[in-house]
Image (cartoon, coloured by chain):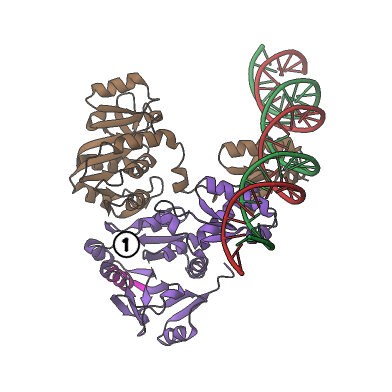
Chain colours: A brown, B purple, C green, D red
DNA sequence: CCCATTCATGCAAATATGCGCATAATATAT
DNA sequence: ATATATTATGCGCATATTTGCATGAATGGG
Protein backbone atom coordinates (compact mmCIF):
# COMPACT_ATOMS: atom_id res chain seq x y z
CA UNK A 1 0.00 0.00 0.00
CA UNK A 2 1.39 3.37 -1.06
CA UNK A 3 1.20 6.01 1.56
CA UNK A 4 0.53 9.66 2.21
CA UNK A 5 0.62 11.16 -1.20
CA UNK A 6 -0.75 14.62 -1.81
CA UNK A 7 -4.06 14.71 -3.63
CA UNK A 8 -2.42 15.97 -6.80
CA UNK A 9 0.30 13.35 -6.70
CA UNK A 10 -2.35 10.73 -6.20
CA UNK A 11 -4.39 12.03 -9.07
CA UNK A 12 -1.47 11.98 -11.46
CA UNK A 13 -0.55 8.47 -10.34
CA UNK A 14 -4.10 7.35 -11.00
CA UNK A 15 -4.01 8.98 -14.39
CA UNK A 16 -0.72 7.27 -15.15
CA UNK A 17 -2.16 3.92 -14.18
CA UNK A 18 -5.19 4.45 -16.36
CA UNK A 19 -3.06 5.40 -19.31
CA UNK A 20 -0.79 2.41 -18.79
CA UNK A 21 -3.25 -0.37 -18.17
CA UNK A 22 -6.26 1.14 -19.88
CA UNK A 23 -8.59 1.12 -16.89
CA UNK A 24 -8.79 1.02 -13.13
CA UNK A 25 -11.41 -0.02 -10.60
CA UNK A 26 -12.29 2.49 -7.90
CA UNK A 27 -12.26 0.04 -5.00
CA UNK A 28 -8.90 -1.43 -6.05
CA UNK A 29 -7.29 2.00 -6.28
CA UNK A 30 -8.84 3.00 -2.96
CA UNK A 31 -7.30 0.10 -1.08
CA UNK A 32 -4.03 0.54 -2.91
CA UNK A 33 -3.63 4.15 -1.86
CA UNK A 34 -5.13 3.55 1.57
CA UNK A 35 -7.93 6.08 1.16
CA UNK A 36 -11.67 5.73 0.94
CA UNK A 37 -13.46 5.14 -2.32
CA UNK A 38 -15.03 8.56 -1.94
CA UNK A 39 -11.70 10.26 -2.39
CA UNK A 40 -10.93 8.15 -5.42
CA UNK A 41 -14.31 8.94 -6.88
CA UNK A 42 -13.65 12.62 -6.33
CA UNK A 43 -10.31 12.25 -8.11
CA UNK A 44 -11.87 10.40 -10.99
CA UNK A 45 -14.61 12.98 -11.24
CA UNK A 46 -12.09 15.77 -11.57
CA UNK A 47 -10.00 13.85 -14.09
CA UNK A 48 -13.14 13.18 -16.08
CA UNK A 49 -14.12 16.87 -15.99
CA UNK A 50 -10.78 17.67 -17.58
CA UNK A 51 -11.53 15.06 -20.20
CA UNK A 52 -8.48 13.01 -19.23
CA UNK A 53 -10.34 9.84 -18.39
CA UNK A 54 -13.73 8.33 -19.06
CA UNK A 55 -15.68 7.20 -16.03
CA UNK A 56 -17.87 4.17 -15.84
CA UNK A 57 -19.71 2.46 -13.03
CA UNK A 58 -17.01 1.05 -10.81
CA UNK A 59 -14.00 2.91 -12.13
CA UNK A 60 -12.59 4.81 -15.06
CA UNK A 61 -10.92 4.06 -18.38
CA UNK A 62 -8.56 5.79 -20.72
CA UNK A 63 -10.45 8.40 -22.64
CA UNK A 64 -10.81 7.31 -26.23
CA UNK A 65 -7.30 6.78 -27.64
CA UNK A 66 -5.22 8.66 -25.09
CA UNK A 67 -4.83 12.21 -26.30
CA UNK A 68 -8.02 12.61 -28.27
CA UNK A 69 -7.54 12.75 -32.01
CA UNK A 70 -8.30 15.90 -33.88
CA UNK A 71 -11.45 14.47 -35.40
CA UNK A 72 -12.80 13.94 -31.91
CA UNK A 73 -11.72 17.29 -30.52
CA UNK A 74 -13.36 18.90 -33.51
CA UNK A 75 -16.71 17.78 -32.14
CA UNK A 76 -16.30 19.79 -28.92
CA UNK A 77 -18.44 22.83 -28.23
CA UNK A 78 -20.14 22.45 -31.52
CA UNK A 79 -23.29 24.33 -30.51
CA UNK A 80 -21.85 27.76 -31.22
CA UNK A 81 -19.53 26.59 -33.97
CA UNK A 82 -22.32 24.80 -35.82
CA UNK A 83 -24.50 27.89 -35.72
CA UNK A 84 -21.67 30.05 -37.06
CA UNK A 85 -20.86 27.46 -39.70
CA UNK A 86 -24.47 27.21 -40.85
CA UNK A 87 -24.89 30.97 -41.09
CA UNK A 88 -21.67 31.29 -43.07
CA UNK A 89 -22.42 28.33 -45.35
CA UNK A 90 -25.79 29.81 -46.28
CA UNK A 91 -24.06 32.87 -47.71
CA UNK A 92 -21.89 31.04 -50.24
CA UNK A 93 -23.23 31.30 -53.79
CA UNK A 94 -22.92 28.43 -56.26
CA UNK A 95 -19.83 27.96 -58.41
CA UNK A 96 -17.56 29.73 -55.95
CA UNK A 97 -13.88 29.03 -55.46
CA UNK A 98 -12.79 29.34 -51.85
CA UNK A 99 -9.52 29.29 -49.97
CA UNK A 100 -10.15 27.71 -46.58
CA UNK A 101 -8.08 28.32 -43.48
CA UNK A 102 -7.42 25.48 -41.01
CA UNK A 103 -9.65 25.57 -37.94
CA UNK A 104 -12.37 23.49 -36.35
CA UNK A 105 -14.95 26.18 -37.08
CA UNK A 106 -14.06 26.10 -40.77
CA UNK A 107 -14.31 22.31 -40.63
CA UNK A 108 -17.89 22.70 -39.40
CA UNK A 109 -18.43 25.24 -42.16
CA UNK A 110 -17.52 22.64 -44.78
CA UNK A 111 -19.84 20.11 -43.17
CA UNK A 112 -22.61 22.71 -43.22
CA UNK A 113 -22.36 23.45 -46.93
CA UNK A 114 -25.60 22.46 -48.72
CA UNK A 115 -25.22 19.08 -50.40
CA UNK A 116 -26.22 20.42 -53.81
CA UNK A 117 -23.90 23.41 -53.80
CA UNK A 118 -21.27 23.31 -56.50
CA UNK A 119 -18.00 24.77 -55.18
CA UNK A 120 -14.26 24.49 -55.45
CA UNK A 121 -12.38 24.30 -52.17
CA UNK A 122 -8.68 24.93 -51.79
CA UNK A 123 -7.10 24.11 -48.44
CA UNK A 124 -3.89 23.05 -46.78
CA UNK A 125 -5.72 21.15 -44.05
CA UNK A 126 -6.13 17.40 -44.62
CA UNK A 127 -9.03 17.29 -42.16
CA UNK A 128 -10.95 19.94 -44.07
CA UNK A 129 -10.04 18.38 -47.41
CA UNK A 130 -11.35 15.03 -46.20
CA UNK A 131 -14.62 16.58 -45.04
CA UNK A 132 -14.96 18.40 -48.35
CA UNK A 133 -14.54 15.11 -50.21
CA UNK A 134 -17.56 13.78 -48.33
CA UNK A 135 -19.64 16.39 -50.12
CA UNK A 136 -20.94 15.30 -53.49
CA UNK A 137 -20.37 18.46 -55.51
CA UNK A 138 -17.11 19.87 -54.20
CA UNK A 139 -13.97 20.00 -56.25
CA UNK A 140 -11.13 19.88 -53.76
CA UNK A 141 -7.59 21.13 -54.27
CA UNK A 142 -4.94 20.35 -51.73
CA UNK A 143 -2.15 22.77 -50.91
CA UNK A 144 1.03 20.79 -50.51
CA UNK A 145 3.83 21.23 -48.03
CA UNK A 146 5.09 20.24 -44.65
CA UNK A 147 2.30 19.98 -42.09
CA UNK A 148 2.39 21.92 -38.84
CA UNK A 149 1.27 19.87 -35.85
CA UNK A 150 -0.46 22.77 -34.12
CA UNK A 151 -2.61 23.97 -36.96
CA UNK A 152 -2.64 20.56 -38.67
CA UNK A 153 -2.16 22.26 -42.01
CA UNK A 154 0.46 23.13 -44.60
CA UNK A 155 1.84 26.53 -43.69
CA UNK A 156 5.45 26.50 -44.87
CA UNK A 157 7.27 28.74 -47.30
CA UNK A 158 6.42 26.74 -50.42
CA UNK A 159 2.75 26.63 -49.50
CA UNK A 160 2.80 30.36 -48.93
CA UNK A 161 4.26 30.94 -52.38
CA UNK A 162 1.63 28.71 -53.92
CA UNK A 163 -1.17 30.67 -52.25
CA UNK A 164 0.34 33.99 -53.28
CA UNK A 165 0.03 33.00 -56.92
CA UNK A 166 -3.72 32.48 -56.59
CA UNK A 167 -6.69 34.77 -56.90
CA UNK A 168 -10.10 33.46 -55.92
CA UNK A 169 -13.55 34.67 -54.91
CA UNK A 170 -13.76 33.89 -51.22
CA UNK A 171 -11.48 33.11 -48.36
CA UNK A 172 -12.82 31.71 -45.11
CA UNK A 173 -10.66 32.30 -42.06
CA UNK A 174 -11.10 30.91 -38.57
CA UNK A 175 -9.23 30.89 -35.29
CA UNK A 176 -8.19 34.53 -35.37
CA UNK A 177 -8.02 36.57 -32.22
CA UNK A 178 -9.13 40.20 -32.40
CA UNK A 179 -7.46 42.59 -29.97
CA UNK A 180 -8.55 45.93 -28.48
CA UNK A 181 -7.32 47.89 -31.49
CA UNK A 182 -9.31 45.65 -33.83
CA UNK A 183 -6.21 43.95 -35.12
CA UNK A 184 -6.40 40.34 -36.28
CA UNK A 185 -3.87 38.16 -34.51
CA UNK A 186 -2.70 34.54 -34.52
CA UNK A 187 -0.93 32.27 -32.05
CA UNK A 188 1.70 31.15 -34.51
CA UNK A 189 4.03 33.06 -36.81
CA UNK A 190 3.67 30.84 -39.84
CA UNK A 191 -0.06 30.66 -39.28
CA UNK A 192 -0.29 34.45 -39.26
CA UNK A 193 1.71 34.65 -42.50
CA UNK A 194 -0.53 32.03 -44.05
CA UNK A 195 -3.77 33.73 -43.01
CA UNK A 196 -2.51 37.00 -44.45
CA UNK A 197 -1.57 35.30 -47.72
CA UNK A 198 -4.98 33.60 -47.89
CA UNK A 199 -6.67 36.94 -47.35
CA UNK A 200 -4.62 38.70 -50.03
CA UNK A 201 -5.39 36.00 -52.58
CA UNK A 202 -9.12 36.60 -52.56
CA UNK A 203 -11.72 39.27 -53.18
CA UNK A 204 -13.77 38.74 -50.03
CA UNK A 205 -12.66 37.51 -46.63
CA UNK A 206 -15.19 35.82 -44.39
CA UNK A 207 -14.01 35.42 -40.82
CA UNK A 208 -15.64 32.80 -38.59
CA UNK A 209 -14.89 33.21 -34.93
CA UNK A 210 -16.48 32.18 -31.68
CA UNK A 211 -17.18 35.03 -29.29
CA UNK A 212 -14.45 34.04 -26.84
CA UNK A 213 -11.86 35.03 -29.46
CA UNK A 214 -13.37 38.45 -29.84
CA UNK A 215 -11.25 40.48 -27.52
CA UNK A 216 -8.13 38.48 -27.03
CA UNK A 217 -4.44 39.05 -27.35
CA UNK A 218 -2.17 36.87 -29.47
CA UNK A 219 1.47 37.31 -30.42
CA UNK A 220 1.43 37.71 -34.20
CA UNK A 221 -0.45 40.40 -36.08
CA UNK A 222 -2.18 39.58 -39.36
CA UNK A 223 -3.68 42.92 -40.24
CA UNK A 224 -6.55 45.30 -39.38
CA UNK A 225 -10.10 43.98 -39.13
CA UNK A 226 -11.00 46.15 -42.11
CA UNK A 227 -9.40 43.50 -44.34
CA UNK A 228 -12.40 41.36 -43.55
CA UNK A 229 -15.61 41.69 -45.55
CA UNK A 230 -17.85 39.63 -43.31
CA UNK A 231 -17.51 38.51 -39.70
CA UNK A 232 -19.71 35.67 -38.46
CA UNK A 233 -19.86 35.09 -34.72
CA UNK A 234 -22.27 33.70 -32.14
CA UNK A 235 -24.84 35.56 -30.08
CA UNK A 236 -22.85 35.54 -26.85
CA UNK A 237 -20.52 38.11 -28.38
CA UNK A 238 -20.22 41.50 -26.72
CA UNK A 239 -22.44 44.08 -28.47
CA UNK A 240 -20.07 47.02 -28.09
CA UNK A 241 -17.13 45.30 -29.78
CA UNK A 242 -19.40 44.17 -32.59
CA UNK A 243 -20.49 47.76 -33.15
CA UNK A 244 -16.89 48.92 -33.31
CA UNK A 245 -16.11 46.19 -35.83
CA UNK A 246 -19.18 47.13 -37.82
CA UNK A 247 -18.00 50.74 -37.71
CA UNK A 248 -14.77 49.63 -39.38
CA UNK A 249 -16.77 48.68 -42.45
CA UNK A 250 -17.17 44.98 -41.70
CA UNK A 251 -20.49 43.26 -42.23
CA UNK A 252 -21.24 41.55 -38.92
CA UNK A 253 -23.47 38.49 -38.76
CA UNK A 254 -24.59 37.06 -35.44
CA UNK A 255 -25.58 33.41 -35.77
CA UNK A 256 -28.42 32.21 -33.61
CA UNK A 257 -27.53 28.85 -32.10
CA UNK A 258 -31.17 28.29 -31.20
CA UNK A 259 -31.97 27.71 -34.84
CA UNK A 260 -29.12 25.27 -35.30
CA UNK B 1 -14.70 -15.04 -23.22
CA UNK B 2 -13.85 -11.43 -22.55
CA UNK B 3 -14.26 -10.44 -18.98
CA UNK B 4 -15.75 -7.74 -16.81
CA UNK B 5 -16.01 -4.83 -19.14
CA UNK B 6 -17.90 -1.75 -18.15
CA UNK B 7 -21.25 -1.26 -19.87
CA UNK B 8 -19.91 1.54 -22.01
CA UNK B 9 -16.82 -0.37 -23.02
CA UNK B 10 -18.99 -3.30 -23.92
CA UNK B 11 -21.27 -1.15 -26.01
CA UNK B 12 -18.44 0.38 -27.96
CA UNK B 13 -16.87 -3.02 -28.55
CA UNK B 14 -20.19 -4.29 -29.86
CA UNK B 15 -20.47 -1.26 -32.12
CA UNK B 16 -16.97 -1.85 -33.39
CA UNK B 17 -17.74 -5.47 -34.16
CA UNK B 18 -20.87 -4.51 -36.02
CA UNK B 19 -19.03 -1.93 -38.08
CA UNK B 20 -16.22 -4.30 -38.91
CA UNK B 21 -18.04 -7.49 -39.74
CA UNK B 22 -21.40 -6.02 -40.71
CA UNK B 23 -23.60 -7.83 -38.17
CA UNK B 24 -23.68 -9.62 -34.86
CA UNK B 25 -26.00 -12.15 -33.20
CA UNK B 26 -27.24 -11.32 -29.71
CA UNK B 27 -26.72 -14.76 -28.22
CA UNK B 28 -23.20 -15.05 -29.62
CA UNK B 29 -22.24 -11.67 -28.21
CA UNK B 30 -23.85 -12.54 -24.90
CA UNK B 31 -21.80 -15.67 -24.41
CA UNK B 32 -18.70 -13.92 -25.67
CA UNK B 33 -18.94 -11.16 -23.08
CA UNK B 34 -20.21 -13.46 -20.36
CA UNK B 35 -23.42 -11.56 -19.70
CA UNK B 36 -27.06 -12.37 -20.23
CA UNK B 37 -28.77 -11.75 -23.52
CA UNK B 38 -30.92 -9.18 -21.78
CA UNK B 39 -27.95 -6.94 -21.24
CA UNK B 40 -26.90 -7.30 -24.86
CA UNK B 41 -30.40 -6.53 -26.01
CA UNK B 42 -30.39 -3.43 -23.84
CA UNK B 43 -27.07 -2.39 -25.39
CA UNK B 44 -28.35 -2.96 -28.90
CA UNK B 45 -31.51 -1.03 -28.11
CA UNK B 46 -29.52 1.98 -26.99
CA UNK B 47 -27.17 1.80 -29.97
CA UNK B 48 -30.20 1.60 -32.23
CA UNK B 49 -31.82 4.60 -30.52
CA UNK B 50 -28.71 6.60 -31.35
CA UNK B 51 -29.05 5.42 -34.92
CA UNK B 52 -25.68 3.70 -34.80
CA UNK B 53 -26.93 0.22 -35.65
CA UNK B 54 -30.03 -1.36 -37.13
CA UNK B 55 -31.65 -4.11 -35.14
CA UNK B 56 -33.16 -7.25 -36.55
CA UNK B 57 -34.55 -10.37 -34.98
CA UNK B 58 -31.69 -12.03 -33.18
CA UNK B 59 -29.10 -9.32 -33.43
CA UNK B 60 -28.14 -6.07 -35.10
CA UNK B 61 -26.48 -4.89 -38.31
CA UNK B 62 -24.59 -1.89 -39.49
CA UNK B 63 -26.90 1.05 -39.98
CA UNK B 64 -27.21 1.81 -43.66
CA UNK B 65 -28.73 5.22 -43.10
CA UNK B 66 -27.00 8.14 -44.73
CA UNK B 67 -23.83 8.12 -46.75
CA UNK B 68 -21.15 6.89 -44.40
CA UNK B 69 -18.05 9.02 -44.45
CA UNK B 70 -14.78 7.63 -45.67
CA UNK B 71 -13.41 7.50 -42.14
CA UNK B 72 -16.25 5.19 -41.22
CA UNK B 73 -15.99 3.04 -44.31
CA UNK B 74 -12.30 2.68 -43.64
CA UNK B 75 -13.18 0.72 -40.52
CA UNK B 76 -14.96 -1.99 -42.49
CA UNK B 77 -13.56 -5.50 -42.73
CA UNK B 78 -10.55 -4.48 -40.76
CA UNK B 79 -9.63 -7.92 -39.50
CA UNK B 80 -7.43 -8.78 -42.47
CA UNK B 81 -6.35 -5.21 -43.15
CA UNK B 82 -5.26 -4.68 -39.55
CA UNK B 83 -3.13 -7.81 -39.66
CA UNK B 84 -1.48 -6.77 -42.90
CA UNK B 85 -0.96 -3.26 -41.59
CA UNK B 86 0.61 -4.49 -38.35
CA UNK B 87 2.98 -6.86 -40.14
CA UNK B 88 4.07 -4.11 -42.52
CA UNK B 89 4.42 -1.47 -39.82
CA UNK B 90 6.71 -3.72 -37.80
CA UNK B 91 9.17 -3.79 -40.70
CA UNK B 92 9.73 -0.04 -40.90
CA UNK B 93 13.00 1.08 -39.31
CA UNK B 94 13.34 4.37 -37.47
CA UNK B 95 14.14 7.62 -39.30
CA UNK B 96 12.65 6.44 -42.55
CA UNK B 97 11.10 8.64 -45.18
CA UNK B 98 8.13 7.04 -46.89
CA UNK B 99 5.90 7.83 -49.80
CA UNK B 100 2.42 6.52 -49.02
CA UNK B 101 -0.17 5.55 -51.58
CA UNK B 102 -3.86 6.23 -50.93
CA UNK B 103 -5.83 3.20 -49.75
CA UNK B 104 -7.65 2.04 -46.67
CA UNK B 105 -5.04 -0.64 -46.03
CA UNK B 106 -2.31 2.00 -46.03
CA UNK B 107 -4.45 4.05 -43.67
CA UNK B 108 -4.46 1.12 -41.27
CA UNK B 109 -0.71 0.83 -41.80
CA UNK B 110 -0.23 4.40 -40.56
CA UNK B 111 -2.43 3.70 -37.53
CA UNK B 112 -0.36 0.61 -36.82
CA UNK B 113 2.98 2.41 -36.75
CA UNK B 114 4.55 2.23 -33.27
CA UNK B 115 3.91 5.44 -31.34
CA UNK B 116 7.59 6.03 -30.69
CA UNK B 117 8.78 5.49 -34.26
CA UNK B 118 10.35 8.55 -35.82
CA UNK B 119 9.38 8.76 -39.49
CA UNK B 120 8.65 11.17 -42.28
CA UNK B 121 5.51 10.49 -44.24
CA UNK B 122 4.76 11.97 -47.65
CA UNK B 123 1.27 11.46 -49.02
CA UNK B 124 -1.31 12.95 -51.30
CA UNK B 125 -4.16 11.52 -49.24
CA UNK B 126 -5.71 13.88 -46.68
CA UNK B 127 -7.12 10.93 -44.74
CA UNK B 128 -3.72 9.34 -44.37
CA UNK B 129 -2.09 12.68 -43.58
CA UNK B 130 -4.65 13.28 -40.84
CA UNK B 131 -4.01 9.86 -39.33
CA UNK B 132 -0.27 10.45 -39.49
CA UNK B 133 -0.70 13.73 -37.60
CA UNK B 134 -2.28 11.78 -34.77
CA UNK B 135 1.05 10.05 -34.30
CA UNK B 136 3.43 11.91 -32.02
CA UNK B 137 6.70 11.43 -33.92
CA UNK B 138 5.71 11.67 -37.57
CA UNK B 139 6.75 14.51 -39.78
CA UNK B 140 4.05 14.77 -42.43
CA UNK B 141 4.40 16.28 -45.87
CA UNK B 142 1.35 16.79 -48.01
CA UNK B 143 1.47 16.44 -51.77
CA UNK B 144 -0.64 19.19 -53.27
CA UNK B 145 -2.96 19.07 -56.21
CA UNK B 146 -6.50 18.44 -57.28
CA UNK B 147 -8.12 15.59 -55.37
CA UNK B 148 -9.65 12.63 -57.14
CA UNK B 149 -12.95 11.54 -55.62
CA UNK B 150 -12.36 7.84 -56.20
CA UNK B 151 -8.95 7.52 -54.64
CA UNK B 152 -9.47 10.54 -52.34
CA UNK B 153 -5.95 11.70 -53.09
CA UNK B 154 -3.95 14.10 -55.20
CA UNK B 155 -3.10 12.34 -58.45
CA UNK B 156 -2.96 15.06 -61.09
CA UNK B 157 -0.15 16.08 -63.40
CA UNK B 158 1.43 18.60 -61.02
CA UNK B 159 1.44 16.08 -58.19
CA UNK B 160 3.02 13.54 -60.48
CA UNK B 161 5.80 15.96 -61.34
CA UNK B 162 6.39 16.69 -57.67
CA UNK B 163 6.72 12.99 -56.87
CA UNK B 164 9.06 12.42 -59.80
CA UNK B 165 11.49 14.89 -58.31
CA UNK B 166 11.73 12.91 -55.08
CA UNK B 167 13.91 10.03 -53.97
CA UNK B 168 13.10 8.36 -50.66
CA UNK B 169 13.72 5.12 -48.77
CA UNK B 170 10.36 3.39 -48.85
CA UNK B 171 7.15 3.52 -50.74
CA UNK B 172 4.03 1.78 -49.46
CA UNK B 173 1.45 0.91 -52.08
CA UNK B 174 -2.03 -0.46 -51.56
CA UNK B 175 -5.07 -1.28 -53.65
CA UNK B 176 -3.23 -2.82 -56.56
CA UNK B 177 -4.66 -5.73 -58.45
CA UNK B 178 -2.28 -8.44 -59.63
CA UNK B 179 -3.28 -10.30 -62.77
CA UNK B 180 -2.41 -13.77 -64.13
CA UNK B 181 0.84 -12.56 -65.67
CA UNK B 182 1.92 -11.02 -62.37
CA UNK B 183 1.35 -7.51 -63.63
CA UNK B 184 0.33 -4.80 -61.17
CA UNK B 185 -2.83 -3.04 -62.28
CA UNK B 186 -5.07 -0.19 -61.14
CA UNK B 187 -8.71 0.78 -61.67
CA UNK B 188 -7.91 4.32 -62.69
CA UNK B 189 -5.50 5.77 -65.24
CA UNK B 190 -4.20 8.62 -63.10
CA UNK B 191 -3.96 6.31 -60.13
CA UNK B 192 -1.83 3.88 -62.13
CA UNK B 193 0.45 6.72 -63.24
CA UNK B 194 0.75 7.91 -59.66
CA UNK B 195 1.55 4.47 -58.26
CA UNK B 196 4.23 4.02 -60.87
CA UNK B 197 5.73 7.41 -60.04
CA UNK B 198 5.65 6.62 -56.33
CA UNK B 199 7.44 3.35 -56.98
CA UNK B 200 10.10 4.96 -59.13
CA UNK B 201 10.83 7.59 -56.50
CA UNK B 202 11.94 5.13 -53.86
CA UNK B 203 14.48 2.40 -53.19
CA UNK B 204 12.09 -0.21 -51.85
CA UNK B 205 8.44 -0.78 -52.64
CA UNK B 206 6.25 -2.45 -50.08
CA UNK B 207 2.90 -3.57 -51.43
CA UNK B 208 0.00 -4.16 -49.04
CA UNK B 209 -2.89 -6.04 -50.53
CA UNK B 210 -5.73 -8.17 -49.27
CA UNK B 211 -5.93 -11.63 -50.79
CA UNK B 212 -9.05 -10.85 -52.84
CA UNK B 213 -6.94 -8.51 -54.99
CA UNK B 214 -4.42 -11.22 -55.71
CA UNK B 215 -5.60 -12.54 -58.99
CA UNK B 216 -7.76 -9.86 -60.43
CA UNK B 217 -8.00 -7.95 -63.64
CA UNK B 218 -7.94 -4.15 -63.82
CA UNK B 219 -7.73 -1.83 -66.80
CA UNK B 220 -4.46 0.04 -66.32
CA UNK B 221 -1.05 -1.57 -66.01
CA UNK B 222 1.51 -0.21 -63.57
CA UNK B 223 4.38 -2.61 -64.13
CA UNK B 224 5.62 -6.14 -63.38
CA UNK B 225 5.44 -7.47 -59.80
CA UNK B 226 9.23 -7.60 -59.80
CA UNK B 227 9.24 -3.86 -59.13
CA UNK B 228 8.05 -4.70 -55.64
CA UNK B 229 10.53 -5.59 -52.90
CA UNK B 230 8.05 -6.86 -50.34
CA UNK B 231 4.45 -8.02 -50.63
CA UNK B 232 2.35 -8.26 -47.47
CA UNK B 233 -0.96 -10.10 -47.70
CA UNK B 234 -3.28 -12.08 -45.45
CA UNK B 235 -3.36 -15.81 -44.86
CA UNK B 236 -6.40 -16.50 -47.01
CA UNK B 237 -4.22 -15.87 -50.06
CA UNK B 238 -3.78 -18.68 -52.57
CA UNK B 239 -0.49 -20.52 -51.97
CA UNK B 240 0.32 -21.15 -55.63
CA UNK B 241 0.11 -17.51 -56.65
CA UNK B 242 2.24 -16.52 -53.69
CA UNK B 243 4.90 -18.98 -54.80
CA UNK B 244 4.89 -17.56 -58.30
CA UNK B 245 5.27 -14.05 -56.88
CA UNK B 246 8.02 -15.22 -54.61
CA UNK B 247 9.71 -16.80 -57.65
CA UNK B 248 9.75 -13.38 -59.30
CA UNK B 249 12.14 -12.21 -56.58
CA UNK B 250 9.56 -10.62 -54.26
CA UNK B 251 9.75 -11.16 -50.52
CA UNK B 252 6.29 -12.42 -49.56
CA UNK B 253 4.94 -11.92 -46.05
CA UNK B 254 1.72 -13.54 -44.93
CA UNK B 255 0.17 -11.71 -41.97
CA UNK B 256 -1.65 -13.83 -39.45
CA UNK B 257 -4.91 -12.16 -38.51
CA UNK B 258 -5.22 -14.37 -35.45
CA UNK B 259 -2.42 -12.49 -33.79
CA UNK B 260 -3.92 -9.10 -34.54
C1' DC C 1 -51.18 -23.25 -38.12
C1' DC C 2 -47.99 -24.38 -34.52
C1' DC C 3 -43.78 -24.01 -32.10
C1' DA C 4 -39.38 -22.35 -30.81
C1' DT C 5 -36.94 -18.09 -30.24
C1' DT C 6 -36.60 -13.55 -29.41
C1' DC C 7 -38.35 -9.33 -27.52
C1' DA C 8 -40.26 -5.72 -24.12
C1' DT C 9 -41.57 -4.70 -19.61
C1' DG C 10 -41.73 -4.94 -14.67
C1' DC C 11 -39.31 -6.21 -10.68
C1' DA C 12 -35.88 -7.12 -7.09
C1' DA C 13 -31.00 -7.45 -5.55
C1' DA C 14 -26.42 -5.93 -5.60
C1' DT C 15 -23.55 -2.38 -6.10
C1' DA C 16 -21.94 2.38 -7.19
C1' DT C 17 -22.68 7.15 -6.77
C1' DG C 18 -23.62 11.93 -5.09
C1' DC C 19 -24.42 15.01 -1.36
C1' DG C 20 -24.35 16.94 3.23
C1' DC C 21 -21.82 17.38 7.18
C1' DA C 22 -18.44 16.84 10.76
C1' DT C 23 -13.59 16.30 11.29
C1' DA C 24 -8.74 16.27 10.14
C1' DA C 25 -4.96 18.13 7.53
C1' DT C 26 -2.79 21.81 5.26
C1' DA C 27 -1.93 26.44 3.91
C1' DT C 28 -2.07 31.36 4.86
C1' DA C 29 -2.12 35.45 7.48
C1' DT C 30 -1.14 38.04 11.53
C1' DA D 1 4.08 30.94 16.92
C1' DT D 2 -0.70 31.29 16.87
C1' DA D 3 -4.98 31.95 14.83
C1' DT D 4 -7.64 31.61 10.84
C1' DA D 5 -8.97 30.20 6.29
C1' DT D 6 -8.87 26.74 3.02
C1' DT D 7 -8.92 22.28 1.55
C1' DA D 8 -9.17 17.28 1.89
C1' DT D 9 -11.19 13.27 3.93
C1' DG D 10 -14.44 9.81 5.71
C1' DC D 11 -19.07 8.40 6.99
C1' DG D 12 -24.14 7.89 6.52
C1' DC D 13 -27.97 7.95 3.74
C1' DA D 14 -30.86 8.63 -0.20
C1' DT D 15 -30.58 7.82 -5.06
C1' DA D 16 -29.08 5.86 -9.50
C1' DT D 17 -27.25 2.22 -12.38
C1' DT D 18 -26.65 -2.31 -13.77
C1' DT D 19 -27.93 -6.85 -14.00
C1' DG D 20 -30.62 -11.18 -14.23
C1' DC D 21 -35.03 -13.34 -14.06
C1' DA D 22 -40.08 -13.89 -14.86
C1' DT D 23 -43.98 -13.06 -17.64
C1' DG D 24 -46.61 -12.27 -21.72
C1' DA D 25 -46.43 -10.53 -26.50
C1' DA D 26 -44.28 -10.64 -30.98
C1' DT D 27 -41.71 -12.74 -34.71
C1' DG D 28 -40.34 -16.04 -38.14
C1' DG D 29 -39.63 -20.84 -39.87
C1' DG D 30 -41.47 -25.32 -40.91
Q: Nearer the viewer, residue B226 or A165?
A: B226
B96 in the magenta segment: no
Q: Which residues are magenta?
A: B191-203
The percent position of residue B213, horizontal first and vertical second, equals 41, 75
For image coordinates 29% across by 31% down, the residue present is: A231
Q: Is residue A69 visible?
A: yes
Kind of element beneath mark 1: loop
Q: Chain of mark 1?
A: B
For image coordinates 64% across by 62% down, the residue present is: B28
Q: Nearer the viewer, residue B179 or B232?
A: B179
The percent position of residue B194, horizontal first and vertical second, equals 29, 68
Q: Nearer the viewer, residue A183 or A29?
A: A29
B200 in the magenta segment: yes
For image coordinates 73% across by 35% down, the residue present is: A38
Q: Is residue B12 above or below residue A203?
A: below
Q: Is residue B90 left or right of residue A198?
A: right
The percent position of residue B112, horizontal first and vertical second, equals 50, 62
The percent position of residue B171, horizontal first and vertical second, equals 38, 69
The residue at which mark 1 appears reads as: B150
Q: Is residue B116 visible?
A: no
Amino acid sequence: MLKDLSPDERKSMILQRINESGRVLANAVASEFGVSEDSIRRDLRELAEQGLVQRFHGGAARSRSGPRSFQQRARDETAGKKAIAAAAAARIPANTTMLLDASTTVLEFVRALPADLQTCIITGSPDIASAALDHPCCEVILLGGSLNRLTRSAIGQSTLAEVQSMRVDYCVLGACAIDEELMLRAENYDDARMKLALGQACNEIMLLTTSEKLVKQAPFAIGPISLVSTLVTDRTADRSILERISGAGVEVIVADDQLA
